[in-house]
Image (cartoon, rainbow, N blue to C red):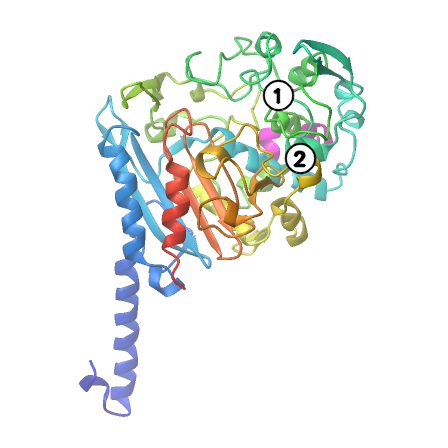
């Protein structure tokens, strides 16, 4: 090459062309391969954006071992830095019973990763003038005004008293409203959630899968859910404690009331279409069912059992109650596009869905230590990837790293993300310009330390 480029004139033009072709060939050889179902991304070799391909492959081997040992069925990992997709790994099975390998265009149950999508949609509705974040929720959803709450006596017994404050929209976004989930509400109130039909997002799972029983009221809507929630006591005084619950599902109804659109239609128009999230929604249509993996659960001997088979799954039909807290499906491609929008402070490929300042608000910590303590996420996946939840706070529908040195992981301050019950996980790291999406289908998350391994492995691959 050097000899061919030593001349002048036409030889110089030939040299420039050869160098360009050579560079393009090198870039293509080390980028995620063409035809892998991940169209719409700029791509680069890891070393071109300050990452080590060898160290990313080391992470692949760690994750592969979980598949080879029969702990998870398969996985898909996407890593992007500085706006470029630099790593893509698909390994294992989509449906072990059918003997099918996992495909790169698979559409996954994302469970609680739905929450961050709902959070972004809520902020879109906020920017459009539907409400203020400090508004009492009861101003827009009267059934949730002037609610009661549980109070625990010295002997441990529970009584019902009037709440002193009304929950706000901000409380819903940060899980400080006092609402709960059926599987973590204190008895007998968890059973009351199920009896009232308030289990959005729990579909296709047996009662012993770890998320508790699903309601058998298949006709209940988000409007029904809100009315029935108003009849149950809160588990904590609004604004005083972080408590995982149906907050995002209530936000879905708030979006409907403020916009005049159904929640799925609002998502489609204001997020999914602008971001080209073509496989995201609340069900998998028949035309795409071959792309829908089976879902599994761990067994006591370290194996797996089938929980939800694709062709008999309840996800084949649109739900009457679209669960913004745990009911969505998405491809890894779609969720990476969503993550890159967050990393782009509300914009992707020239399409803006949120303002930079609103995304900054979303990714900021909203649980001050003087109110919520130093490890506020009492029930969350933070315990499975961080040091007992220390150093981890919460933003608007996702966790935020506030003191990296306390987590036991090489993470950046401001890293924002969340996971789902089927062991899926994502994060964006604005300081390092990194976005990561990990998909698998094993309920419950936390069965294995996948999230810690992912955070360790990806951050260890950042070398510049």
Q: Which mark is residue 180?
A: 1
Residue 376 position within the rendered picture, expressed as x and y whole percent measured from the top left:
60, 34
In what quadrant of the picture does the N terminus appear? bottom left
Position of 177 with respect to 319 (left or right) is right
Depth check, front residue: 361 or 10: 361
Q: The residue tagged with tag 2: helix, strand or loop?
A: helix
Residue extending farthest bottom:
8
Residue 270 position within the rendered picture, expressed as x and y whole percent measured from the top left:
60, 41
Depth check, front residue: 244 or 125: 244
Q: What's the distance in space between the residues labelled 1 and 2, CA to CA?
A: 17 Å
Q: Is residue 360 above or below residue 279?
A: below
Q: Identify the residue shown where x is 63% and y is 47%.
A: 364
The span shown in magenta is 254-266
Q: Quadrant of residue 252?
A: top right
Position of 58 with respect to 177 (left or right) is left
Residue 222 lies in the magenta-colored region: no
Q: Which mark is residue 372?
A: 2
């Amino acid at each position: 090459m050097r000899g061919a480029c030593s001349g002048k004139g036409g030889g110089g033009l030939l040299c420039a062309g050869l160098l360009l072709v050579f560079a393009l060939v090198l870039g293509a050889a080390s980028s995620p391969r063409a035809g892998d179902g991940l169209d719409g991304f700029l791509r680069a070799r890891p070393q071109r954006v300050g990452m080590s391909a060898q160290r990313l492959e080391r992470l692949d081997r760690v994750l592969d071992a979980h598949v080879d040992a029969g702990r998870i069925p398969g996985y898909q990992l996407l890593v992007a830095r500085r706006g470029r997709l630099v790593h893509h790994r698909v390994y294992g099975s989509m449906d072990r019973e059918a003997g099918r390998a996992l495909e790169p265009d698979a559409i996954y149950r994302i469970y609680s990763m739905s929450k961050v999508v709902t959070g972004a949609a809520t902020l879109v509705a906020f920017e459009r003038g539907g409400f203020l974040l400090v508004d009492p929720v009861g101003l827009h959803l009267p059934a949730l005004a002037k609610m009661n709450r549980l109070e625990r006596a010295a002997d441990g017994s529970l009584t019902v008293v009037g709440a002193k404050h009304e929950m706000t929209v901000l409380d819903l976004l940060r899980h400080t409203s006092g609402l709960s989930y059926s599987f973590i509400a204190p008895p007998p109130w968890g059973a009351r959630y199920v009896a009232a039909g308030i289990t959005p997002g729990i579909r296709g799972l047996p009662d012993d899968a770890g998320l508790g029983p699903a309601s058998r009221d298949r006709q209940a809507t988000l409007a029904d859910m809100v009315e029935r929630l108003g009849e149950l006591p809160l588990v904590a005084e609004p604004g005083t404690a972080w408590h995982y619950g149906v907050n995002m599902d209530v936000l879905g109804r708030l979006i409907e009331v403020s916009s005049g659109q159904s929640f799925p239609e609002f998502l489609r128009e204001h997020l999914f279409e602008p971001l080209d999230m073509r496989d995201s929604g609340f069900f998998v249509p028949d035309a795409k069912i071959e792309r829908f993996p089976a879902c599994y659960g761990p067994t006591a001997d370290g194996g797996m059992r089938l929980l939800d088979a694709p062709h008999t799954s309840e996800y084949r039909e649109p739900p009457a109650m679209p669960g913004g807290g745990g009911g969505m499906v998405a491809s890894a491609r779609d969720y990476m596009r969503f993550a890159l929008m967050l990393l782009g402070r509300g914009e992707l490929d020239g399409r803006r869905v949120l303002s930079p300042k609103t995304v900054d608000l979303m990714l900021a910590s909203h649980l001050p230590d003087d109110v919520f303590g130093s490890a506020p996420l009492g029930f969350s996946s933070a315990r499975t990837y961080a040091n007992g939840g220390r150093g981890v706070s919460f933003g608007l529908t996702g966790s935020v790293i506030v003191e990296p040195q306390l987590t036991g992981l090489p993470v950046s301050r401001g890293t924002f993300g969340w996971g789902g019950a089927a062991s899926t996980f994502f994060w964006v790291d604005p300081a390092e310009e990194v976005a990561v999406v990990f998909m698998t289908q094993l309920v419950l998350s936390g069965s294995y330390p996948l999230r810690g391994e992912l955070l360790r492995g990806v951050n260890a691959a950042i070398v510049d």
